[in-house]
Image (spheres, helix red, strand yellow):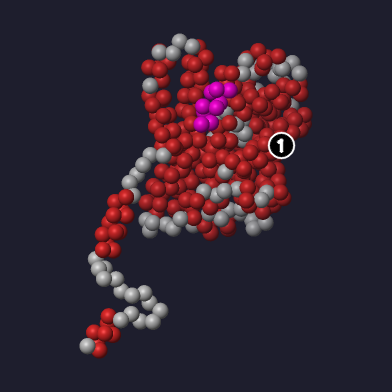
Amino acid sequence: MNGMSEQILPTPGQPPATADPPSAPAADHATSGDRKWRPGQLELFVLALLVLLVGQSWIADRLDSRAVQTWSTVFVAIAVQALPFLVLGTVISAAITAFVPASVFTKALPRNQALAVPVAGAAGAVLPGCECASVPVAGGLMARGVAPAAALAFLLSAPAINPIVMTATAVAFPGRPEMVAARFVASLATAVFMGWLWVRFGKAEWLRIPKRFSQAPSGSRWEDFRIGMQHDFLHAGGFLVVGAITAATLNVTVPKSVIDAVSDNWWIGIIALAFLAVILAVCSEADAFVAASLTGFSSTAKLAFMVVGPMVDVKLIALQSGTFGKAFAIRFSTATFVVAVLTSVVIGWWLL
């Protein structure tokens, strides 16, 4: 009896034993059964995008309004241009998270943030992607221990100075190598200066690093890669749709006569094309051809269009807001717009 009493009575400091321990597995089974996948807003956004892409011709045939047809065309064009690079960015971000050790980034960049910023900005020259790809990659870099200032410099420079963009600029402006040089210098200078501004004035509470990167790994790198890519694509894809909708709406509502009226004034032309770059949200690999077609504007205004576009447009603002938070997107995009315009004016006066 004494032995049985010792087994039944709980030891001091421990809770009493339950009468029917087999009920715990049943509770666990019920809990796991409740974990059913339900589509959220982002999944619905991506589904709507696919429906519009597949049924564009069917929808356009049933819409008589020319403005609505133009809206549909602009929306699909932006989405189709950006989607491949968004996939590229999510693949790179997921691969960095799953396969690259965090020590690689801490060793590759100087410990001093002021020195790490220009190194990270120059590294953007080797990534052939647009702004849609740079946002998830920058988020992955921050989560892997890279200083936010360096990651932000890379975010701005990667879509603006990569080899594909430079080649497209040279083709769009044949016989004018100064335009290629001016775009490279102005874009890199803007990215580095914005990184330094974050070092000096940035606050941690303004920036929200994606929570996914703080979760424990599953034990399989390929599984982590799959989960990370799925998360980033669904998350960024929804905000890409929001940005494309905004860009298409603004593109249709701003009259062309307003654009033509300001092209004669040098200063107003620069500001007008800078805001036009924000509204149109043209992919960085194609914006040089749009700039070259704006024959009524000065070369500096065209440079501002090419510098501002890859760094600040409605699509990119939506992506940044969804990835890093609205407070960050508002402050960062506003400051980047001002710096990009001023840098374009200085470099345009110097080289053009």
Of the 4 image quadrants, the one containing the C terminus is top right
At 40% from the left and 79% from the top, the residue drawn is 13
Main secondary-structure element of the magenta-colored stretch: helix
Name the residue at 47% across, 51% down: 212
Q: Does residue 106 show up magenta in the picture?
A: no
Dot 1 amino acid type: Val
Q: Label 1, on which residue?
A: 339
Provide residue 174's location: percent of width, then percent of height.
62, 22
Span highlighted in magenta in the image: 242-250
**Is residue 213 in view from this perspective?**
yes
In the image, 253: left or right of 14? right
Q: Relative to the observer, which residue lies in front, 199 or 164?
A: 199
Q: Position of residue 281 (x, y in %)?
A: 57, 28
Residue 345 sits above or below residue 151 on the image? above
Residue drawn 37% across and 51% down? Answer: 223
Question: For numbered disc 1, what is the local secondary structure?
Answer: helix
Residue 270 in picture, x, y percent from top left: 72, 25
